[in-house]
Amino acid sequence: MEDLEIGRRLENGRNPRAVLIAGPTASGKSAFALRLAERENGVIVNADSMQVYAELAILSARPTPEEEARVPHRLYGQVPASTRFSVAAWREEVARILAEIWNEGRLPILVGGTGLYFKALTEGLSAVPPIPEALRLELDRAANEEGVPALHARLAGLDPDAALRLAPNDRTRVLRALEVVLATGRTLAAFQAEPALPPLIAPEDAARIVLEPDRAVLYDRINKRLDAMVEAGALEEARALLALGLDPNLPAMKAIGVTEFGGYLAGKVSLDAAIVEAKMQTRRYAKRQGTWFRNQMGDWGRVG
């Protein structure tokens, strides 16, 4: 079936304000979005948490300069790896970009593999104010120097309910709960109990598509794409990122390939072993994505 016919079928006969294309890594999202954008006067908007980082063009499988030249692309590679880019920051950027695209009379096509971005887009987001970057850096340093359990103990004095719910070594959630209460004087649960920031696109106003290739096909694509990444310079990209000396807990440093190829570059493993490990981690990530889409986006249309 042609892409455009698929889109119309999922729109239930109505013209959508936006097309949302989700799917696991290597499922063909970017190619699908590109074809649709060329036919529908569309603008492609990134909904992938790793493709926002400037230093991860190859490792995040960002659209190539040739692909970006075919139709407008937004929110790709605009954030330095030293920044901790959040879903709230993405939502704020997308709100501005959607207004611009609609004012131009074009169709926004949001594509990516980060399910939380799509939930923030169509379901809203808890109204927690922005956290000062200095506080985040201070807590990161404290976690590195003192250990996460020490910060968990600190959280217990400020937000005992959160501390009871969270494991002492759950770095991400402990830091999040602690930064919110320190920055605002209120608990994260208090914000979550309030009305959320509203959706930017109502579900009924969008064509919502999840790409679901057969698992064997998807895993074969992942393996071949990883080999192509190495040929395209993934090792050099990992080397350049690691040379920046950034905090290893930053989101960009957790991109698949950074640790694996970093091990090879440090002489700890062979290149073949690093490639095998990166492929395995990518397959595991794709499996987690698929599970998330099934559980959290069950009412979206599916395309095999």
Image (tube, grey):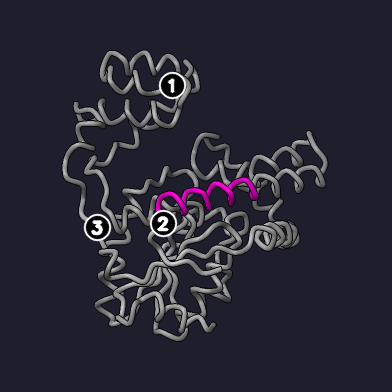
Amino acid identity at mark 3: Pro
Amino acid identity at mark 2: Gly
Q: Is residue 187 above or below residue 153?
A: below
Which residue is tagged 1?
167
At label 1, counting other C-alpha atoms closer than 10 Å, the crowd grade (few under 14, some 14-19, many 20 or more) is some
Measured Cα–Cα span from mark 1 to mark 2: 29 Å
Q: Position of residue 176 (x, y in %)?
A: 35, 31
Q: Is residue 39 above or below residue 132?
A: below
Label 3 near label 2: C-beta < 8 Å?
no
Q: Element type at marker 3?
A: loop
Q: Element type at marker 2?
A: loop
Which residue is tagged 3?
199
Q: Element type at marker 1?
A: loop
Residue at 34%, 19% in the rendered image:
163
Q: Earlier in the sequence, mark 1 or mark 3?
A: 1
Q: Earlier in the sequence, mark 1 or mark 2?
A: 1
From the viewer's perspective, tell me whether residue 15 is left or right of residue 277: left
